[in-house]
Image: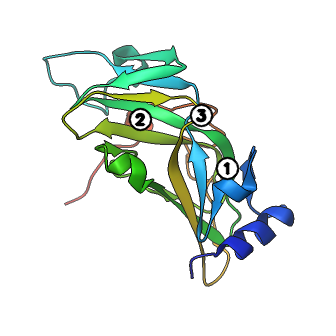
C-alpha cells in the first residue's frame, strides 16, 4: 500500500521515516507523496567521442562536479543532481522518486532508471536529470522538482540497504556518479 499524507506525517513524527529539512510541510507533503527540492550541486559529463566501459573507468575521471544556484539544461542534455533533502527509509518501507508533472510538461525528467529507494537507504537522492524538450530550461537550487512516494512492505526486509552488500551509495551527501567500476563483472551463462 502507498502511504497517504497522514501516514507519511505519522512515520516522520515517530522518527521512523526521515525527510529533512521539511521547511513547509503544508506545501511539501502532498496527498500521497513528499515534494523534494533540488540541491545546489551538479555533475556534468565530459564531452567525449570515444566509447568507454563503465566497469573499467573511474567516473570521477570523466565528470565535473559544479556548485550552482541556477543551471540551464539544454535539450538532450543529461546531468546528475541531488535532492536538497536527506532521506532515511526504514526497513519496512520502500521509496520511489518521480518527477513532478509541472516539470515533466517542460520536458524535464528526473530519473532514467533509478526510481527505487531501498529499505535502509540513508542519504540524499541522486537525480538523473535530462531535458527531453526542445528549449533550454533554467533549473534553480531549491526548486520542488521531484516527489517521493512510500510503500509498506509485507514484512521488514531481512537485509536492508547499507548492510552486507556493498551499498555503494549509502550516506551520500550530494549527487553521486555511477559506481559500476566497483562491481564484480563476472557473469555466468
Q: Nearer the viewer, residue 132 or 162?
A: 132
**Observer-nearest of 176 and 111:** 111
Can you give x and y, in whole percent of width and height, for residue 12 in the image? 79, 62
Marks 3,2: beta carbons within 8 A: no
**Residue behind mark 3:** 142
Residue 133, percent from left and from top: 22, 39
Q: Is residue 3 visible?
A: yes
Element on which disc 3 rests: loop
Q: Secondary structure at mark 1?
A: strand
Q: Residue at x 37, y 21 (%)?
A: 44
Distance Cα–Cα, label 1 vs label 3:
16 Å
19 shown above or below 67: below
Q: Residue 13 lies in what quarter of the image? A: bottom right
**87 to the left or right of 149:** right
Would you place residue 163 above or below residue 136 in this image? below
How packed mark 2 is, by other alpha carbons closer than 10 Å (few <14, some 14-19, many 20 or more), is some
Q: Which mark is residue 178?
A: 2
For residue 129, the mark is: none
State which quarter of the image contains the N terminus.
bottom right
Instruction: Tell me, for residue 87, which label it has, or none.
Output: 1
Question: Of marks 3 and 2, which one's residue comes earlier in the chain?
Answer: 3
Amino acid at each position: 500500500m502507498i502511504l497517504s499524507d497522514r501516514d507519511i506525517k505519522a512515520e516522520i513524527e515517530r522518527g521512523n521515516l526521515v525527510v529533512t529539512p521539511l521547511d513547509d510541510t503544508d506545501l511539501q507533503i502532498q496527498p500521497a507523496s513528499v515534494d523534494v527540492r533540488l540541491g545546489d550541486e551538479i555533475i556534468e559529463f565530459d564531452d567525449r567521442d570515444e566509447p568507454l566501459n563503465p566497469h573499467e573507468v573511474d567516473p570521477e575521471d570523466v565528470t565535473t562536479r559544479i556548485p550552482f544556484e541556477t543551471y540551464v539544461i539544454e535539450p538532450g542534455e543529461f546531468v546528475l543532481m541531488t535532492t536538497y533533502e536527506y532521506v532515511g527509509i526504514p526497513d519496512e518501507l520502500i521509496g520511489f522518486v518521480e518527477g513532478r508533472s509541472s516539470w515533466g510538461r517542460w520536458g524535464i525528467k528526473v530519473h532514467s532508471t533509478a526510481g527505487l529507494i531501498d529499505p535502509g537507504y540513508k542519504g540524499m537522492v541522486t537525480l538523473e536529470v535530462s531535458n527531453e524538450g526542445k528549449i533550454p530550461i533554467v533549473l534553480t537550487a531549491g526548486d520542488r522538482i521531484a516527489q517521493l512516494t512510500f510503500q509498506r512492505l509485507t514484512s521488514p526486509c531481512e537485509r536492508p540497504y547499507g548492510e552486507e552488500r556493498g551499498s555503494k551509495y549509502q550516506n551520500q551527501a550530494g549527487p553521486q556518479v555511477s559506481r559500476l567500476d566497483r562491481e564484480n563483472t563476472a557473469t555466468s551463462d
